[in-house]
Amino acid sequence: MPQRTDTPPAWDERTQLATFLDYARDTARAKCEGVSAEDARKGPLPSSPLMTVCGLISHLRWVEYYWFQVIFLGEELAGPLSEATDDDPDPEMRTAVDIPLPQLLAEYEEQSARYRRLVSDHELNSTAKRPISDGRHVDLRWVILHLIEETSRHNGHLDVVRELVDGRTGA
């Protein structure tokens, strides 16, 4: 596990945004350290049975895919998100309990590396190919900020789930 830091090596906007997104990603991974395979699949919240450690990591992976590849690059939706329905809105969380946590984490890290390159290869003002739900085309800056918010919010969920399944806090 690399050393987590929210202090960027340079103070330009791109470096600051990339550093904060990596910090949120690294925090999610740190919250998974030492969790057993059994506990990673437990859904301790009765009203949110899909909220497992595995489910949350899978969700983070697929959310980044959606925002970077589908919205920003304009690619066609694929993977578990393409199977979402009103009755099963989060298939990436439901199916994650069948995938070992180390595999989910490896896929998340591999994808994060790809998206680091994408962020470095595009201007922050570059406009997304697809519109968001209100019809507007956001820019790459907005996508990065949204993913910082999304990942940080789910890190809070990981805190709660982890404490409930095995008592671990912190990270």
Image (cartoon, rainbow, N blue to C red):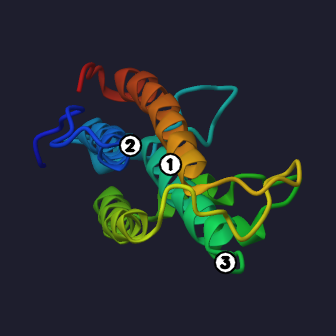
> Tag 1: Cα neighbours inside 10 Å, few (<14), some, or many (≥20)?
many
Residue 44 spot, x, y in % from top left: 52, 28
- The residue depicted at 47 percent of the width and 39 percent of the height is 148
Q: Secondary structure at mark 2?
A: helix
Residue 27 spot, x, y in % from top left: 29, 37
Camera-nearest residue between 18 and 101: 18
The residue carrying mark 3 is 78
The disc labelled 1 sits on which kind of residue?
Ile
Mark toward the viewer: 2 or 3: 2
The disc labelled 3 sits on which kind of residue?
Ala
Lateral position of residue 148 relative to residue 165, left or right:
right
The label shown at residue 144 is 1
* Quarter of the figure that contains the C terminus: top left
> Tag 3: Cα neighbours inside 10 Å, few (<14), some, or many (≥20)?
few
The residue carrying mark 2 is 17
- The residue depicted at 34 percent of the width and 70 percent of the height is 117
Q: Secondary structure at mark 3?
A: loop
Residue 19 spot, x, y in % from top left: 29, 43
Contact (CB < 8 A) between labels 1 and 2? yes
**Distance in Å between CA atoms under marks 3 and 1:** 21 Å
Ranked by sequence position, the earlier of labels 3 and 1 is 3
Contact (CB < 8 A) between labels 2 and 3? no
Ranked by sequence position, the earlier of labels 2 and 3 is 2
The answer to whether residue 22 is above or below residue 131 is above
